[in-house]
């Protein structure tokens, strides 16, 4: 289930994203690290409520983190040192939370719990057991959408508990990533067609608010999904700027590969040249008898180690409560 679509009747699976420019309806999983999974389905229907066994819940104190507070704060300081040296402008630093997978847990039940307790515009549940894919996403962020030749992205940078809580660094963070996304889309879009119709708009989401911008353009003739993904992936909002340098810092500072986290999940109707891929944040996945979840944020010169740690806690707090079986008010 991706968004409001239920895809059934698996036809084939490939790691070649060029298949998205062929035909059929596809569920797409693009891990931050690891091969793509593009699954073509025979039937598309409106999504329906989950009617199976409910999600069993995971106590909040069962989760462990790949970077504890001291290590995360140290990472923030090291990124600020790199910024001071002129090596990079912004780096997205994340950590992975993990907990033992409950007996008889079904990712569709987890997806239903998230849909009720933390509804999100780019939610998705993908279950492909034969390919080791069990994931449920409550993502608020659009990575890449397409309608014919029009393509657009809506990066989120800037998070606060309330709209009054945004700092100057939040807007600076957002504008830097907008510039990066403009450059990425410019690699595959018509000259002069890339525009920014919305800059730093305030969006309310369950438990927090974000600054969201939109960048769009018109694909050049001959360019399709594979070209657009190649030009823009991984998403700029979860890497940093410049992107290549930011990725090098991420590889040094994060002790565990991100896997599906910070990748992209969504659907593509290849016949109609339509589709939407999210940024795979607020996303849970099953692996090695554990359920995993990532949280992080963009580090700029104005960041503080304490403030960035608290932002990761804010982003995780509500979702971990929902997964524990405690539905929280919006």
Image (tube, grey):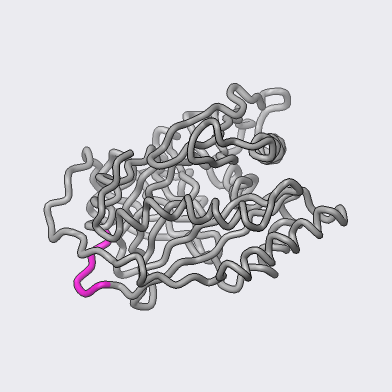
- Dividing the picture into quadrants, the one containing residue 287 is bottom left
Judge by depth and name the residue closer to the eye, 152 or 49.
49
- From the viewer's side, name the closer residue of 258 and 317: 317
Give the residues drawn in magenta, as a range.
Answer: 102-107
Determine whether, in the image, residue 75 is placed left or right of residue 325: right
Residue drawn at the location 59% of the way across and 36% of the way down:
166
The picture places residue 191, in percent across and down from the top left corner, at 72, 26
Q: Position of residue 218 (x, y in %)?
A: 60, 27
Q: Is residue 245 magenta?
A: no
In the rendered image, residue 267, in percent from the top left (x then y), is placed at 39, 44
Q: Is residue 272 left or right of residue 110?
A: right
Which quarter of the image is occupied by the C terminus? top left
Query: Residue 95, can we see it?
Result: yes
Residue at image x 68%, y 35%?
A: 168
Q: How many marks?
A: 0
Write the residue at 35% across / 48% down: 124
199 is higher (above) or lower (below) than 107: above
Q: Main secondary structure of the magenta part?
A: loop
What residue is shown at x 52% (from left), y 29% (from top)? 202
Is residue 152 visible in this depiction of the protein? no
Horizontal side of 290 relative to 195 (left or right) equals left
Farthest residue toward the bottom?
288
Front-most of 163 and 31? 163
The image shows residue 135 at horizontal and vertical percentages of 35, 59
* 232 is higher (above) or lower (below) than 147: below
């Amino acid at each position: 289930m991706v968004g409001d679509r239920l895809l059934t009747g698996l036809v084939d699976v490939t790691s070649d994203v060029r298949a998205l420019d062929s035909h059929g309806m596809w569920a797409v999983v693009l891990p931050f690290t690891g091969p793509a999974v593009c699954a073509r389905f025979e039937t598309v229907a409106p999504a329906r409520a989950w009617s199976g066994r409910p999600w069993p819940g995971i106590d909040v104190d069962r989760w462990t983190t790949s970077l504890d507070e001291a290590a995360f704060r140290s990472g923030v300081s090291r990124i600020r040192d790199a910024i001071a040296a002129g090596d990079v402008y912004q780096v997205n630093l994340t950590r992975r939370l993990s907990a033992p997978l409950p007996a008889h847990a079904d990712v569709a039940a987890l997806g239903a719990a998230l849909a009720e307790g933390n509804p999100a515009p780019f939610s998705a549940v993908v279950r492909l057991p034969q390919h080791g894919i069990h994931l449920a996403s409550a993502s608020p962020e659009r990575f890449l959408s397409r309608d014919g030749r029009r393509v657009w992205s809506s990066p989120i940078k800037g998070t606060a508990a309330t709209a009054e809580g945004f700092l100057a660094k939040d807007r600076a963070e957002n504008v830097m990533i907008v510039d990066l996304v403009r450059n990425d889309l410019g690699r595959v879009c018509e000259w002069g067609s890339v525009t920014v119709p919305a800059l730093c708009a305030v969006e309310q989401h369950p438990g927090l608010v974000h600054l969201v911008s939109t960048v769009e353009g018109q694909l050049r003739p001959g360019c399709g999904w594979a070209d657009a993904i190649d030009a823009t992936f991984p998403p700029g909002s979860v890497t940093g700027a410049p992107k290549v340098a930011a990725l090098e810092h991420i590889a040094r500072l994060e002790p565990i590969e991100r896997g599906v986290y910070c990748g992209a999940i969504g659907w593509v109707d290849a016949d109609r040249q339509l589709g939407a891929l999210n940024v795979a944040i607020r996303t849970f996945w099953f692996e090695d008898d554990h359920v995993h979840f990532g949280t992080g944020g963009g580090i700029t010169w104005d960041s503080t180690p304490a403030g960035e740690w608290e932002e990761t806690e804010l982003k995780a707090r509500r979702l971990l409560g929902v997964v524990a079986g405690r539905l929280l008010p919006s």
